[in-house]
Amino acid sequence: MEGLIARAVSKTYRSQRGPVRALDNVDMTIAKGRLFGFLGRNGAGKTTFIKIATALLRPTSGSIQLFGIDVVDRPREIREQIALIPQEAKPFYQLTPREHVEEYLRVRGLSAETAKSRADEVLAAMGLETYQSVPAMVLSGGLQQRTLVAMILATEAPFLFLDEPTLGMDPFARRQVWEVVRRAARKGSTVLLTTHYLDEAEQLSEELAVIEGGHVLYQGVAEALKSKVRREVRLQFSGGFTAQELARYGDVYPDRAGLTLLTTRSAVEELTQRALERRVPVNVGPVTLEEAFLTLVGRAIEDEDAETPA
């Protein structure tokens, strides 16, 4: 049995400018027990898809099944199978991390003993032991986010939806979360992860999908997506060069720091020498999932489309 099967899922919103198609005939399959990355810019359709898959929103057309259960026809059964951390979630400021975890598990029907045991385990794994008795209102944003993620992972639900779970965390905390997410998948949970950190998606995802403009452009493994990039090397220039000047060497994309060039190995020596002569910082590295995303979508994952619902 598959974990998730989506068939021709579409969602149209009404707006002052007229109908907006947030999802357009999306087909997607996630194997049971898989750790699956779902990638796209803000406005690409990720959050709309998750809301439909978790029975929070009805599709305009199409269907989604989780473990063979139709999410529209049997929403109560779906909610017993899932745990969700939405991107906009906030903690209860007066509660401590331990209270968040234990109370949430009790609401889901677990015994007090099981709730305490799981809280002990997840708080330690997430690096929250030191803060377990501190009210959320005085915790940093990163610690508040860790608390929310701990709540969801402690459920050990069959299907976990993690929407930007490490947003606002420092690199060390992110890696702690990665290990707990991996452990959840090893225990048998199916995990759907959305993230703007493409290194995170590359580290965690056994398989992934890329959505843009409500269409799924790719589903498969990260290595196969990276192999679609025609170039071998990534160079990032912090000024000193124009896009027109670099275009003859390969594919040029603007980024926050300056320009990214995807090129061949043979061009690296010449370009790094010219950057040295101009005293321009340049970073050289292999093609990553970020460059594969750029090549597939044509824009960086940080670019937003304000006209389209998420």
Image (cartoon, rainbow, N blue to C red):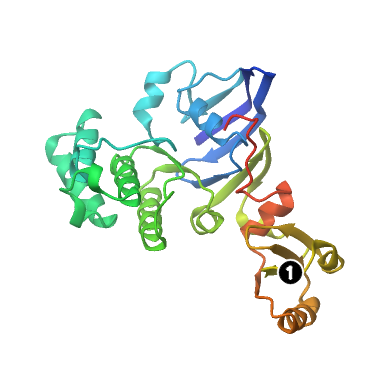
Kind of residue at badge 1 = Glu
The x, y position of residue 53, in whole percent, is 50, 28
**Considering only vertical position in the picture, is 84 above or below 235?**
above
Q: Along the line of sight, which residue is nearer the eye, 121 or 65? A: 121
Q: Which residue is mark 1?
A: 232
Q: From the image, which quarter does the C terminus lie in?
A: top right
Question: Is residue 217 depicted above or below 199 in this figure?
Answer: above
Horizontal arrangement in the rendering, residue 199 relative to residue 113 (left or right): right
**What element does badge 1 sit on?**
loop
Q: Is residue 201 above or below residue 113?
A: below
User: With respect to residue 231, does 88 lie above or below?
Assistant: above
- Dot 1, crowdedness within 10 Å: few (<14), some or many (≥20)? some
Q: Residue at x 71, y 83 (%)?
A: 276
- Residue at 74 percent of width and 65 percent of height: 261
132 lies left or right of 229:
left
Question: In front here: 219 or 131?
Answer: 131
From the viewer's perspective, is 109 left or right of 82?
left
